[in-house]
């Protein structure tokens, strides 16, 4: 994408998400600023990632007239407050996933964005993954005929620490914190409207680390989503998922390394490794949307849909929402 001048964006929070996104945005015309509750920490990030300045508080960054947008990369329990503050100050806001503690929070965000004449975005990179883009194309083209079954394997081991072990701050367990990406993936295949039912193995009262979701697409396919932080996978992340239809199947590596189509024709596809996680395409779309004042491909309606599905999974699994 091209723009007339660099776009100014302040990261609120200096942790892993900011580190990762700084590298992606370094390749785009975005002047980055860094804000933290620790001025020293913000200055460190600003120096390390070639930023345009740093702030010792989130409020200072939001109030600065140089800043056109903020990226909210703080723990989930702070997202709503910071989002509303930014939007009411006339700043665009990109919110790290998971966005808010409740899907009902989207109403206040929409109102604040409209009143401020700005836009809010949820950073769901999975929607933009080359793998998902290719799967949508294949299913729309009918390469396996009518889809019948979907099986998504998102099992892995992941160590968590700090605020992610506090469900009140994190907003939930593994499904909410990381599995929401896969819920979005399942809901964005281009099939009919998705409903889910959740099952939790060996419930022990602590924030869940594993969940299985039964999937139903309207009157169409059914399937399953397996998500875990406590199941070893080959090479610490290599997993195989599959979609079956009446005339064949699509087998794919869950991260997006390859796709094998066996149906009306046989093909091995490589969706793309350069932006395999979809971050580049996501930021390109969001920056275009801000520049042109146009709707992004992944909008607040889709983000709210995804959070509602997570809430639906928790409710049917008998898992209490941490904020209830």
Image (cartoon, rainbow, N blue to C red):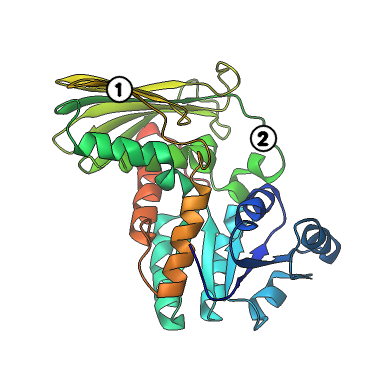
Residue at x 53%, y 81% (from the top left corner):
90
Seen in the picture, residue 236 relative to 36 is either above or below; the reply is: above
Please indicate whether residue 106 sits to the left or right of residue 41 in the image.
left
Task: Please report whichever mark, 2 or 1, sits nearer to the chain's N-terminal start.
Answer: 2
For label 1, the crowd category at 10 Å Cα-Cα, with few meaning under 14, some 14 to 19 and many 20 or more, is: few
Please indicate whether residue 219 sits to the left or right of residue 271 in the image.
left
Q: Please indicate, yes or no, whether residue 100 appears anywhere in the rendered image.
A: no
Residue at x 39%, y 54% (from the top left corner):
303
Q: Position of residue 134 (x, y in %)?
A: 33, 37
Mark carried by residue 267 = 1
Compute the Cα span from label 2 to label 1.
Answer: 38 Å
Q: Nearer the viewer, residue 302 or 108?
A: 302
Q: Position of residue 141 (x, y in %)?
A: 19, 36
Residue at x 17%, y 22% (from the top left corner):
264
Q: Nearer the viewer, residue 201 or 242?
A: 242
Which quarter of the figure has residue 96? bottom right
Mark carried by residue 160 = 2
Q: Secondary structure at mark 2?
A: loop
Residue at x 38%, y 67% (from the top left corner):
107
Q: Secondary structure at mark 1?
A: strand
Which residue sits furthest right? 40
Q: Nearer the viewer, residue 269 or 152?
A: 269
Mark carried by residue 116 = none
Seen in the picture, residue 26 relative to 219 is either above or below; the reply is: below
Please indicate whether residue 159 sits to the left or right of residue 148 in the image.
right
Q: Position of residue 320 (x, y in %)?
A: 46, 41
Q: Nearer the viewer, mark 2 or mark 1?
A: 1
Q: Position of residue 198 (x, y in %)?
A: 37, 32
Q: Please indicate, yes or no, whether residue 297 appears anywhere in the rendered image.
A: yes
For label 2, the crowd category at 10 Å Cα-Cα, with few meaning under 14, some 14 to 19 and many 20 or more, is: few
Seen in the picture, residue 174 relative to 302 is either above or below; the reply is: above
């Amino acid at each position: 994408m091209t723009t007339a001048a660099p776009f100014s964006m302040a990261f609120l929070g200096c942790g892993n998400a900011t580190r990762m996104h700084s590298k992606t945005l370094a390749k785009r015309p975005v002047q980055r600023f860094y804000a933290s509750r620790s001025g020293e920490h913000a200055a460190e990030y600003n120096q390390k990632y070639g930023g345009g300045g740093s702030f010792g508080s989130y409020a200072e960054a939001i109030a600065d007239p140089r800043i056109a947008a903020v990226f909210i990369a703080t723990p989930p329990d702070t997202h709503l407050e910071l989002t509303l503050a930014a939007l009411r100050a006339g700043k665009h806001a990109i919110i790290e996933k998971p966005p808010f503690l409740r899907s009902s929070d989207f109403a206040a965000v929409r109102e604040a964005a409209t009143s401020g004449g700005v836009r809010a975005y949820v950073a769901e990179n999975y929607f933009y993954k080359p793998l998902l883009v290719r799967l949508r194309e294949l299913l729309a083209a009918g390469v396996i005929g009518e889809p019948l079954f979907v099986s998504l394997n998102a099992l892995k081991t992941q160590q968590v620490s700090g605020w992610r072990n506090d469900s009140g701050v994190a907003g939930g367990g593994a499904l909410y914190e990381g599995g929401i990406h896969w819920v979005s993936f399942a809901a964005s295949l281009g099939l009919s409207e998705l409903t889910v039912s959740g099952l939790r193995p060996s419930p022990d009262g602590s924030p869940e680390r594993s969940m299985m979701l039964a999937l139903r697409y309207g009157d169409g396919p059914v399937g399953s989503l397996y998500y875990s932080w406590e199941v070893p996978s080959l090479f610490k992340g290599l997993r195989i998922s599959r979609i079956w239809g009446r005339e064949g199947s699509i087998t794919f590596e869950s991260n997006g390394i390859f796709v094998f189509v066996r149906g009306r024709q046989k093909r091995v596809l490589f969706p793309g490794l350069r932006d395999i996680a979809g971050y580049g395409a996501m930021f390109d779309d969001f920056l275009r949307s801000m520049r042109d004042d146009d709707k992004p491909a992944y909008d607040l309606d889709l983000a709210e849909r995804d959070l509602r599905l997570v809430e639906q999974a928790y409710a049917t699994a008998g898992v209490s929402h941490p904020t209830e």
